[in-house]
Image (cartoon, rainbow, N blue to C red):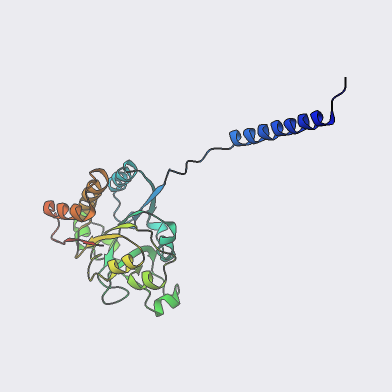
Amino acid sequence: MKFSTTKISALTIWAIAVILISVYLVQNLDEPQSNPSVTIVKAAIIDQLHDDIPNQIFQDRATQYLTTAGYDVDLYTTKDITVDFYKELPSKKYDFIVVRSHSVARGTTEESASIFTGEIYTESKYIQEQLLGQIGKAVPFLPSEVEEIGWESLVNKTYFVVGSKLIDELMVDSFSGSVIILGGCDTASGKLLAKSLLRRGASEVVGWDGLVGARDNDRSILALLEMILLDDVPTSKAVEKVMQEFQPRSKYSPTLKYYS
């Protein structure tokens, strides 16, 4: 039996097409299918107080609120929080950042509050940054914590601190509309720290305008997070509600401030 050349060519083309389609289907079935509509949102809890004034309840509840709201959460504790960590923080692209930290009204400039790192101060380290005033050193102001907990040994620790000059001059990349909650003494004193964070790309910044006890800070920040993340209250309104209910247990009566 004889086939024409035309019929043989048609059969060959058809067979090749079947093989190519089969290979394509096998390859695509084996590969995991991505869902372009799923957006991962990230959050960070930066607990500089972890070693000195630990609060596991704060970490657990803050993590719970964030994960319930759909965030992937990374926890950083004292040993992780270095000068370089803060330099690189914007590049990590967190959408929501919660800081629990010692801070000081002055440290790198007269107008800026500064946040403590977990890095013990060494005169021979970060020499250029120190000379240019981009980082500083400070000892935690601890009378309320010492009264509450009795850890007098904390008073003599000196840490590197970072403020607006590091944010303006040394931070890598920009925040992507991050919400930043600064839980610590004087984090909103002078406004300069908050303004630098906003210029660096944060969308909202919350902090205290004066001294605050560790327990008062933790209770208030958790209440704030619950309202924002679980009750869907706008950040500015949540700050107002927290302050309406704020009853300090220490001798300090600071105000939680909101900037955007």
How far across and down, in percent of the image, does residue 230 sit? 25, 43
Q: Left of 153 or right of it: where is 127?
A: right
Q: Quadrant of the C terminus?
A: bottom left
Report the side of 254 relative to 86 (left or right). Answer: left
Q: Quadrant of residue 13?
A: top right
Query: Residue 130, how many percent across, how many down?
Result: 40, 76
**Closer to us: 67 or 174:** 174
Residue occupying the point 12% across, 51% down: 245
From this view, report whether residue 113 is shown above or below residue 40. Answer: below
**In the depicted structure, whether residue 77 falls above or below residue 125:** above
| Residue sitting farthest toward the top | 1
Residue at the image point whose x is 58% and y is 37% from the top: 31
Asked if residue 171 can be seen in this view, the reply is yes
Question: Which residue occupies 26% across, 75% down?
Answer: 111
Residue 28 placement: quadrant: top right
Q: Position of residue 74 (x, y in %)?
A: 40, 50
Choose between 32 and 126: the one closer to the eye.
32
